[in-house]
Amino acid sequence: MKKLLVGTALATALLFSAQANATDFNPGDPEFQVFGDITNGTVSATIGNAGIAAGVFTDRFIFTLDQNGTGSGSVATSASIFQSVTDLDLTSVSINGIFATRIADPMGLSEFYSLVGVPIIFGVENIITVSGVSRGNGSYGGNLTFEPGAIPEASTWAMMIIGFGMTGAAMRYRRRRSVVKYAL
């Protein structure tokens, strides 16, 4: 029994030591270029990674914006020869935990992931996660867009609620003053 426990512990340690190669990128890194006015307008960006070593990998693109809005994007990879050193298989792409839709060609040489209309929240870390398996010199690339104002800010919601409350109070006050009299 003791040998079984030691063997299981050793196997578990080896499994966790061989976890995915994880890399974080921030705007301004060569792998994460941002274009446009981050504080007042639309933003577009390119993401990608090239020369990915053989094995399982996870890349995270981490960013914050100064306003709420909606984001969309796509990530793609392709290879000339199936199962060659440059062939890379993407296993998932997500933005803030929302997974993109996968389209792959039947030959297994290219993959395309797409996601539209994802809420991007200001002031918090938004994370794009790209995971896959590289055969030694894989690469992928993607394009992203951001449109501001699609999600109302907290102050906007507060003003709307106060406005509805005041409208309701005015209607109630007006109804109390109306007295209906009938002629006999």
Image: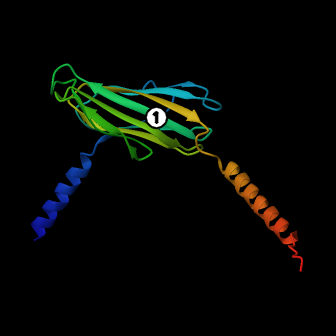
Residue 77 in the image: state x and y as whole percent: 29, 27
Label 1 crowd (10 A; few <14 / some 14-19 / many >=20): some
Question: Quadrant location of residue 59?
Answer: top left
Q: Residue 32: tell me if it is visible.
A: no
Q: Residue 60: tell me if it is visible.
A: yes
Judged from this view, the residue extending furthest toward the front is 184
Q: Residue at x 40, y 37 (%)?
A: 115
Report which residue position mark 1 lands on. Answer: 72
On the rendered structure, is 151 left or right of 127? right
Quadrant of the drawing holding the C terminus = bottom right
The foreground one among 177 and 47 is 177
- What is the three-letter code of the residue carrying label 1? Ser
The foreground one among 124 and 183 is 183
Residue 183 in the image: state x and y as whole percent: 89, 76
Secondary structure beneath label 1: strand
Q: Residue at x 60, y 30 (%)?
A: 38
